[in-house]
Amino acid sequence: MLSMQEILETIKMVQEENLDIRTITMGISLRDCGHLETKTACRRIYDKITRLAGGLVEAGEKISRQYGIPIVNKRISVTPISLIAECSDAENYLAFARALEEAAGATGVNFIGGFSALVQKGYTVGDRRLIASIPEALAATERVCASVNVATTKAGINMDAVLQMGQVIKETARLTADRQGGGCARLVVFANAPEDNPFMAGAFHGTGEPESVINVGVSGPGVVRNVVERLGGADLGTLAEEIKKTAFKITRMGELVGRTAARMLQVPFGIVDISLAPTPAVGDSVAEILEAMGLERCGAHGSTAALALLNDAVKKGGSMASSYVGGLSGAFIPVSEDAGMIRAVQEKALDLTKLEAMTCVCSVGLDMIAVPGDTPAETIAAIIADQAAIGVINQKTTAVRIIPAYGKAVGDMVEFGGLLGSAPVMAVNPFSAAKFVKRGGRIPAPIHSFSN
């Protein structure tokens, strides 16, 4: 049970420090929805999603009123569509994306994830068809999110898929250029993708998950920043201890909301993802936490060490608060969604090279990065390969969500709106990696992957 002191602290966090539940996400298995006829399969998908998730938004709003805690997003993740559509007669999977879009609209959720494929070791026919359909699918929808896992520590890196995803990102940006390339904001390329991630755009419902489940993503950069500021010049050990205690309180709140939602919707409770997820709102920034620790600007020398401390303390505190911590869990550093990151890029304190170094110790990777629209697909593929290598070698999840901004040059701003925010266009290395990424094949798994 929560003590009165904990309740009062939580109220203060909500009212003054931007604390919220970033998302309650219902995972839904579609493994019983496959059918040879595409229309039948799509109808089954729509019917199952709307039947199971029809009360999700209402439940979230009721819990928010009951506990006085903002629940910003209600979302759905589904079984990777490449697995479901493969048995159909469709050669293009746009119809499946439209079925997901219609189901999302009918249930009232803001995003639905799972237009996905897992190709870390190679393609099936369904994988190839889904990946080829991604640009058109994201251009034709507003709520559908796509993801492709191209690497794992056990399998290595599928460089054929890496190169293709560079091309897919470019084509998605071209088809959604009228929306600032916004289709790419709903497309993630992963290494070591988790099966229970509640955050978009990378959420999908893994094959090891139950029929349906509730996963929760909490957020509290503003809360942690205020803790750091209150501690003044305390040593780093004290700082880590207080961040850990704060993450514990945040996670307790998230588990309470998740279990309440699961009970109301009569589905199992899954996990709490304890990631510190920033927003463009003032005071809700991971970059500002690092600056409160003593960095003049995020991106200065020492940023990687400060982020490592933050990420580790958040994981330790969250793990003590719940037996079911999962998803990504740590600290996100998306440029467009973090006011402090945007400022750091604009003031030239932060560039892609430093961001890449910081991804070695954070939860995800290069997230919501805008680059010039004329950036070659091979360069984007090489950026993906670098991030995949960091994930594979370090046995962690890494990802790339990158937006080629057509008609924009370095320093221009790209506006996405809402939680996606805005991003300054960042410079990429001008030297080519085309010959390297075009070699294809698979980069073998590292020696430490043989842990059996």
Image (spheres, rainbow, N blue to C red):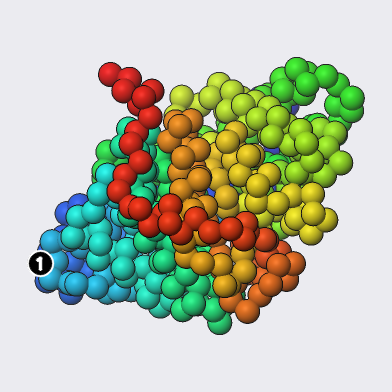
Residue 239 position, x and y percent, is: 77, 23
Percent of width and height locating residue 441: 30, 48
Decide: is 439 above or below 408: above
Residue at horizontal 57 percent and vertical 72 percent from the top: 374
Q: Position of residue 4 (x, y in %)?
A: 70, 27
Q: Can residue 130 be seen in this view?
A: yes
Secondary structure, mark 1, is loop
Q: Is residue 178 above or below residue 106?
A: below
Residue positioned most to the left: 36
For the residue marked with disc 1, what is the amino acid? Leu
User: Who is closer to the viewer here, 448 or 267?
Assistant: 448
- Residue linked to disc 1: 36
Whether residue 394 is situated above or below residue 37 in the rendered picture:
above
Is 178 on the left or on the right of 436, as rendered? Answer: right
Q: Residue furthest bottom?
A: 178
* 117 vs 323, nearest the viewer: 117
Determine if residue 55 is in view. Answer: no
* Residue appearing at x 55%, y 45% in the figure: 365
